[in-house]
Amino acid sequence: MPRSSRIFLGPVEIAGYYSGLEAGLRDLGLDSWAIDLEPHPFRYRTDERDDPVVVRLVGRVRDHRPKPSAARALHALWWAVWAPARVLLLIWALVRFDTFVLSAGVTLLRGYDLPLLRLLGKRLIFVFHGSDARPAYIDGQRMAPGRALAIPECIAVARRQKSGIRRIERYADVIVAQPAFSHFFERPVVNWFAIGVPWRDRPNARARERRDHAPVRILHSPSDPKVKGSERIREAVERLKAEGLPLELVELRGVANDVVLSEMAKCDFAIDQIYSDAPMVGFATEAAVASRPAIVGSYAWAANRSAFGTIPFPPVEECTPEGLVDAVRRLATDAVHREALGREASAFVHDQWSRTQIARRMLRLMEGPPPDEWLFDPRGLRYVEGCGLSREEAQGVVRAVLREGGRAALCLSDKPELEAEFVDFAAGKGDGGLD
C-alpha cells in the first residue's frame, strides 16, 4: 500500500487541528487516527469512533490522571500504568501506520522512539503550533507578567527547545511551522499557512437577527487571558462604551468548543487576541466559518506578509496592539465593512481551508517533497517581538536574558543576523521584520 494510506495523527490535540485533519483524510478514504494523550478541556471531538482496545485503554488511563494535589504515591501508581500503556500504543501504531503526523514536537515515547520510527522507514511529519517552538524569551505563555519564569529558567527552557528541535530535524522528513516563530529551526520549514486550519463545520445555533437598536455584540474566548491580552480588550470596549457606543462584550473561558460556536452565531464580530504572531488561527477561523470578522492584533503583519509569498493571506481586521481601540470602533460603527469582511473571511476558509483541501495538501507532504513555494527559510527571519507580550515586555525579557547569559543564551548562533536583531531590540533599536 502507498505510505499515505495509513496515517497516525497526534499524540496531542491542538485546538481541534488533528481531529479536523483526521476527518479530512477520512473523507479521502484514508485510514487515519487522531490520538490525544492529554485530556482536553474544550472537547473538540464530538463524533463517536469505534476505537481499538489499546486506544480505549490509553484513553481511560489518561482520563484518570491524579490531580496535582493528589498524594505522591497515587501519582507513582498512575505512572506505573501510564508508561506501559504508551508502549502498547506505540507497538500498535508501528504495526498499523506508515506515516506519522506528530504534533508540537511530541512523540509517543518523548522522542526516544524517533530512531526506531526512522529505522522502520516511517515517514515523519512534525507540525508545530506556537509555544512548542517559539523561543521562551518571547513567548507570553512562559513570560507574561505576573507568572514569568525566572530568567535562568527561561534560558534553560530555550536551550532545551533548541536541542529538541535539532534532534527532531535529524529525523523528520518534513517540518511544518509558522514563519514568525521559526527562530530555532536550521532547515527550511513548510509555512503552516500553506496547509491551513482544518476546521470542522458543526452548526449548532441559528444566527441571531439583528435589531436596529441592539448593542453590537462582541465575542472573546481566550484560552489564556494574559497571553491573549484580555484585560486590554476589556479596557478598549469600556472606553468605547464610555464614548457612547452601544457595545456588549461576551467573554467565554474554559467552556466546550460547541458553546463557543453557539455564541459565535449570536455575535456581530469577534476579538481573537492582541499579541499574536499569526494572522488567523483557531478562534479567528471559527469566526470566519460563521461569517463573522475577527480582530487580530499583532506586531508581525509585515513579517508574515513577506514570508507568505504566493500563499493566500487570511482576511481579518488587522491592527497593532496599540491600534485595538480604532479597530473595535471601525467594526462596531461600520456595518457595511463588518459584514463584507465577514463574508470575505467565510469565502476564504471555505475556498482555501476546507478540510478535504487541507487533507490533500498534507497528503502531498506524505508522498513527496513540498513545493518550493510552500517553504520558508528561517535564516531570513528578523521578527523579534514574539507572541503574548507587549513590545516593551518582550524587550525587557530579552534584555534580562542577554544580561544573564550573553548572546549564547539566545541560542541563535546559527543565525548571526537574527541574533544581532535581538541585541538591537533589547537596546531599543529597530522593530523587527524579515529580509
Image (cartoon, rainbow, N blue to C red):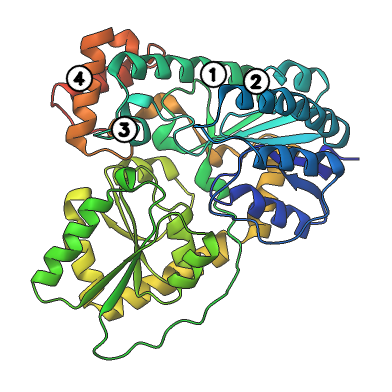
Alpha-carbon span between mark 4 and mark 3: 16 Å
Q: Amino acid at mark 4?
A: Arg
Pointer 3 with pointer 2, Cβ within 8 A: no
Amino acid tagged 1: Gly
- Left or right position of 307 against 391: right
Q: Which mark is residue 111?
A: 2
Classify residue 323 by image quadrant: bottom left
Question: What is the C-alpha distance between the residues marked 4 and 1?
Answer: 24 Å
Picture quadrant of residue 107:
top right
Identity of the amino acid at label 2? Gly
Tell me if 36 is positioned left or right of 406 in this view. right
Could you tell which of marks 4 and 3 lies nearer the N-terminus?
A: 3
Q: Which residue is mark 4?
A: 399
Disc 1, SS: helix
**Secondary structure found at label 2:** loop
Q: Quadrant of residue 411?
A: top left
Q: In the displayed image of the protein, which residue is found farthest to the bottom?
A: 212
Find residue 164 and name its label.
1
Residue drawn at (81%, 51%) of the image: 30
* Amino acid type indicated by mark 3: Tyr
Residue at figure coordinates x 43%, y 70% from the top left? 344
Disc 3 target residue: 383
